[in-house]
Amino acid sequence: MTADKILSLPQALVQVAKWQQAGEKIVFTNGCFDIVHLGHIDYLEKARALGDKLVLGLNTDASVSRLKGPTRPVVNQYARARMMAALAFVDAVILFDEPTPLQVIEQIKPDILVKGDDYTVENIVGSDFVISNGGCVQTIPLVKGFSTSSLIEKIKQM
């Protein structure tokens, strides 16, 4: 079942250690992934192509509300986690409630940290940690014209 890819942080640490012992490169990214669209799919597929396993940090509902406002998320965390876990190129999903995924990044110790090109490497949370541990940080070009906020606005206008 794809739901088996939704892991607590302690479960994820055990799994990631197994992957690393097998010599696999771990890619980490994070986000809200509230209303899944082409931009998300393209981004995650490209992130996974940078390594062997993609670990996705997913903001909890409370975290999304703090970041995006009281009307968000539109889709609850269990549904968002299941959708992310159902993607063939996502190997593990970890929910986090903190404002940033720094604690998760510091424990997972990914080989590659990825965000969209709307960030610069210097602005990516955890970049200093990953680089200081011998990893790298990369940005991926985002598909123009796709964002959850713009989709919500379009729906409101209908």
Image (spheres, grey):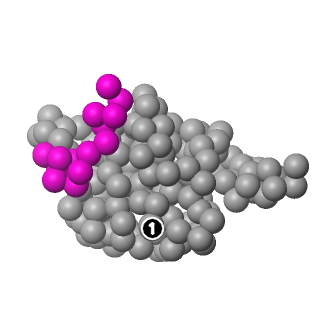
Position above or below: 49 against 33 = above
Q: Which of 51 and 87 is in front in this view?
A: 87
Position above or below: 105 against 90 = below
Q: Name the residue rendered at 46%, 61% in the picture.
A: 61
Say which quarter of the image contains residue 103: bottom left
Residue 145 visible from this viewpoint = yes
Q: Name the residue rendered at 56%, 66% in the picture.
A: 119
Q: Is residue 154 left or right of residue 133?
A: right
Provide the residue span drawn in magenta: 1-14
Q: Name the residue rendered at 81%, 56% in the picture.
A: 156
Rendering coords of residue 129 (x, y %): 29, 70
The kind of residue on which mark 1 rests is Ser
- Residue labelled with disc 1: 63
Say which quarter of the image contains residue 137: bottom left
Say which quarter of the image contains residue 69: bottom right
Rendering coords of residue 148 (x, y %): 67, 54
Q: In which quarter of the image is the N terminus?
A: top left
Q: Is residue 9 magenta?
A: yes
Position above or below: 69 against 155 = below
Rendering coords of residue 87 (x, y %): 46, 32
Q: Which of 58 and 124 is in front in this view?
A: 58
Rendering coords of residue 94 (x, y %): 32, 51
Task: Tell me if mark 1 has few (under 14), some (14-19) or many (20+) residues whose alpha carbon lies within 10 angstroms of its own.
Answer: many
Secondary structure predominantly adopted by residues drawn in magenta: helix
Q: Which residue lies furthest to the top in this view?
A: 1
Q: In this view, does 35 lie to the left or right of 110?
A: right
Residue 27 visible from this viewpoint = no
The residue tagged with tag 1: helix, strand or loop? helix
Q: Nearer the viewer, residue 45 or 156?
A: 156
